[in-house]
Image: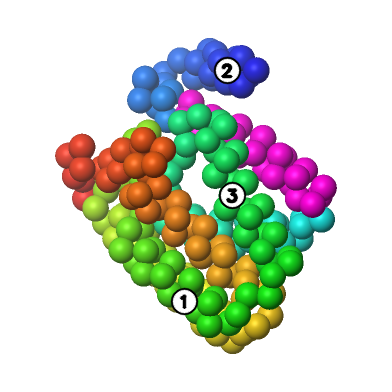
Amino acid sequence: MREKILSTAMINIKNKYPEYNDDKLEEISYGLEALYITFTKTIVIFGISLVLNIFKEVLCILLCYNIIRTTAFGMHAKKSWHCYIISGVLFIGTATICKYVDVNIYVKYIISIIAFIILVRYAPADTYKRPLINKYKRKRYKVMTIITSMIYLIFIILFKSSVASSFLCFGLLDASLMIHPFVYRMFQLPYDNYKNYIVTYR
């Protein structure tokens, strides 16, 4: 079904914009595929969260995660079922912990600091379909990720034992895991894809 929807969409785009070259069409195709997977994945995650009565927790963690991911980026699974497994473990798992486990504040501090170090070290992490070739953009995304992560750490300290600090902590953790080279290798995905291209400065 996914292939049929995406194929139909690409045919319509080609007919409407015949001036688009192969690179542009490939970029659009990748974007549409990512959008489709994100949409269907979100429906599944929200459906499961409603059944498990953890919808609020999942929503808050997803929000905290996506704010970081906007600049840190991270892996995209090649297969849909890989994506569902990752999302289930990261979002359903951490939301369940937030709902039913009173996580010690010092444990949150340790998790948050480790996640922060990973983000400082590895962000931004690109994909083979969307390599971050521009050197200055990579630096800018890294700085933005570090600033956002530091703001998270400050609020985690301020909120202390509240559930809000757990949302921020696990959002930070999930984002850091999605950019770690080990996770890329685990799903047989290439890392530091920009190194395969000529570096640009524009």
Quick check: 37 above or below 23?
Answer: below
In the displayed structure image, the side of residue 16 where residue 133 appears, left or right: left
Report crowding for label 1: few under 14, some 14 to 19, many 20 or more residues within 10 A (C-alpha). few
Q: Residue at x 48, y 72 (%)?
A: 112
Instruction: Let me know if residue 131 appears in the view.
Output: no
In this picture, which residue range is highlighted in magenta?
Answer: 28-52
Q: Position of residue 164 (x, y in %)?
A: 67, 74
Q: Residue at x 48, y 26 (%)?
A: 29
Instruction: Name the residue that disc number 1 marks.
Output: 110
Q: Are marks 3 and 2 in contact (CB under 8 Å)?
A: no
Q: Position of residue 100 (x, y in %)?
A: 74, 67
- Tell me the amino acid under the disc marked 3: Val
Instruction: Name the residue that disc number 3 marks.
Output: 89
SS of the residue at dot 2? helix
In the picture, the quarter occupied by the N terminus is top right
Q: Main secondary structure of the magenta part?
A: helix
- Mark 3 or 2: the one toward you: 3
Q: Is residue 100 magenta?
A: no
Q: Position of residue 12 (x, y in %)?
A: 58, 16
Please name the colour scheme applied to the rendered image: rainbow
Instruction: Name the residue that disc number 2 marks.
Output: 3
Q: Residue at x 77, y 57 (%)?
A: 54
Quick check: 177 above or below 132?
Answer: below
- Tell me the amino acid under the disc marked 1: Ile
